[in-house]
Image: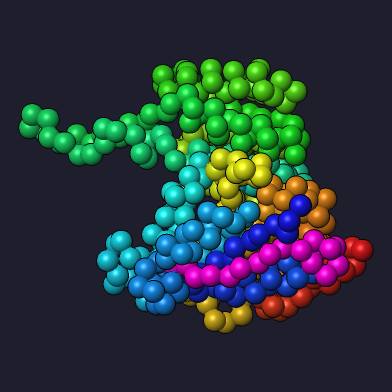
Amino acid sequence: MSTPSLLILPGDGIGPEVMTEVRKIIDWFGAKRDLAFDVTEDLVGGAAYDAHGAPLSDETMEKAQQADAVLLGAVGGPKYDVLDFSLKPERGLLRLRKEMDLYANLRPAQCFDALADFSSLKRDVVAGLDIMIVRELTSGSYFGEPRGIFTEGNERVGINTQRYTESEIARVARSAFELAKRRGNKVCSMEKANVMESGVLWREVVQKVHDEEYPDVELSHMYADAGGMQLCRWPKQFDVIVTDNLFGDLLSDVAAMLTGSLGMLPSASLGAPMANGRPKALYEPVHGSAPDIAGQGKANPIACILSFAMALRYSFDEGAEADRLEKAVESVLADGKRTADLMQAEGGTPVSTSEMGDAIVAALDASL
Ligand code: NAI
Ligand code: MG
């Protein structure tokens, strides 16, 4: 098989800083694990606007469509606040998501033992947690028509519509079942079938996809409000959770905070399988460009590094190497290395962005 291609879009602010550390990791896998990637780097966001007058050029868009996976840093910054809405850095990211039709947004909640005391929940509840929320990203309440603010008689009415077609539900369900097969083989689907017709259809379609295509994956259904409670009470009962756009927005933020810092959170957005069987995919940290710390060597590169680990697992079928990378991160944290965002009030000396990257590379070396 030909060398898999990876398009890297560092973006703005701390984006290029954390991506520099990811490049060290990618180089390590090439040199030490014979895992080579055909890496191309390009511009997105404010950096692209500065160069071409648009937050994503057509040429870069085309490269993203062709790549086996895209890895993005972050976009945006105060310098671009004055720009017209259509030229803002964030539009570059939205264009990528829309034109690649990335309908499944993956947000893992993973708790590294060394950071378990960072959680607002008890150590027992979160230590060793490893769950994945799959949020439908391109339909539902944020897109359904009719929408708007209308006048009815002598007052106004605000309307949004929760709308899902069978095929939209089926494709995100397939993404969730495929992920479950590479993880704990368990999917919990969440909706409000008790009060919403779209939820009734959701439950029916997820069940049908399961019965016909993934009978060996364990499937359960839960009302989304109960799901929120269970996430806080005993999150380790879950493996993969699949839910719609609106509930997924809330539940993925709740799940993220079970484990602590923004500087630790990776994500992925997946679309339809390409000709080679790999899904279209964009991997990125959850955080933004952090203009308050940009250029100071303070950014935590782990969120972006773990996003690359997700790429290894979900785009390149290198689950064992993804495990190796996650274990390297775990061991560096266990050694007490912390970037500033991971420091508790008691103090100590934080490591810089590049020191954290180097420590993870050293831990990878030690894993051989
Ligand atoms: P942000 O995520 O950039 O920062 C929020 C806070 O978390 C800041 O105090 C920042 O210093 C800290 N932080 C974030 N990532 C960190 C890391 N890796 N290591 C250490 N500390 C970290 O969100 P904010 O401040 O609301 O937005 C800043 C800019 O980023 C805006 O222009 C916004 O539009 C853009 N943004 C871009 C996103 C993306 O590219 N996906 C997502 C969110 C915001
Ligand atoms: Mg949100």
| Residue 330 magenta | no
> Which colour assignment does the render follow?
rainbow
Q: Can residue 142 be seen by looking at this rendering?
A: yes
The magenta region covers: 29-45
Furthest residue in direction bottom, as rendered: 296
Question: In percent of the image, x 68 and y 38: which residue is there?
Answer: 179
Front-most of 288 and 340? 288
Residue at screen point 89% across, 63% down = 367
Residue 257 in sight from this viewpoint: no
> In front here: 348 or 1?
1
Residue 232, by quadrant, is top right
| Rendering coords of residue 147 (x, y %) | 26, 36
Residue 233 lies, in percent from the top left, at 64, 35
- 30 in magenta: yes
* Left-right relation of 13 to 258: left
Which corner quadrant holds the C terminus? bottom right
Q: Which residue shows up at 59% across the image and 56% down it?
A: 67
Quick check: 295 above or below 11?
A: below
Where in the figure is residue 39, as x and y percent of width and height?
Answer: 65, 67
Answer above or below: position of 352 versus 22. Answer: below
Front residue of 38/305: it is: 38
Residue closer to the observer: 278 or 283: 278
Horizontal relation, residue 3 to residue 88: left or right: right
